[in-house]
Image: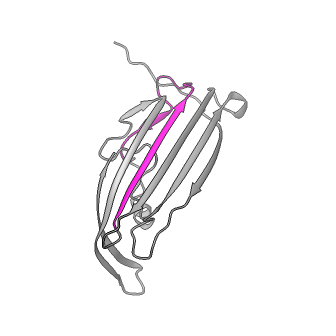
Amino acid sequence: PAASLPEVGNYAGLVLGISYSGLEGTRFAYRSNKGRDLDIDLGIYDPALGSDYQDLRVDATFGQRIGMPWRGQQVLAFELSGGASAGALARRGAFGLSGLSTYQDTIRNVLNRVTWSETGRLRGYGANASRGRYFGLLQTEYRTPVLDVDRGIGSAVPLALERVVFSMFTD
């Protein structure tokens, strides 16, 4: 059978988004340890905006962090993401669920303490593992501190280790 080629051309549009964040953290917590956040995006793609395709996309992400009542800064975190597209890119799919990109900026992620990857990231899967017009993803993560180091090396080299954290997750 002959392979079908993906759509090519410009995919330009306008994306309107709204965000809410009620996340809270403490000095010794790894990232936020309680609260919730919500992001909603609506994308409009049209030839009048420079696109070769017409499409209407909506996607949303809701996150909840629950601080555990026992000792330490332990956190149970949930993130629910979903999206739908009118389907202009039928063969390629408007959304992609995949593992980490080969162009992942690891140093920036470490400095920003990123444990949740971008929406649509499945940890442990290769790039473009699944594509389609719709997606739904539930991520759960349990984080507990192992060791608070809080030490640095010299004043000329800005290198420090704050803490070691154990994280269990499922996508």
- Confirm whether the magenta stretch covers residue 98: yes
Residue furthest out toward the bottom: 155
Q: Is residue 128 above or below residue 103?
A: above
Q: Which residues are magenta?
A: 74-100
Say which quarter of the image contains residue 112.
bottom left
Query: Relative to 102, is 88 on the left or the right?
Result: right
Residue at 54% across, 25% down? 87
Left-right relation of 18 to 30: right
| Residue furthest front as drawn | 69
Place of residue 149 in the rendered image (x, y in percent of width and height, measured from the top left): 31, 79
Q: Please determine whether, in this image, residue 85 is positioned above or below residue 63.
A: above
Q: Residue furthest top?
A: 1
Residue 20 in the image: x percent, y percent? Answer: 59, 55
Q: Position of residue 41 (x, y in %)?
A: 59, 43
Residue positioned 36% across, 44% down in the render: 122
In this orientation, which residue lies closer to the viewer: 42 or 105?
Answer: 42
Q: Could you say which quadrant of the image residue 16 lies in?
A: top right
- Let me know if residue 171 is in the magenta part: no
Apparent side of residue 10 relative to residue 110 in the rendered image (left or right)? right
Looking at the rendered image, the quarter that the C terminus falls into is top left
Q: Say if 101 sits above or below 151 in the image.
A: above
Q: Residue at x 42, y 87 (%)?
A: 155
Q: Nearer the viewer, residue 151 or 24?
A: 24
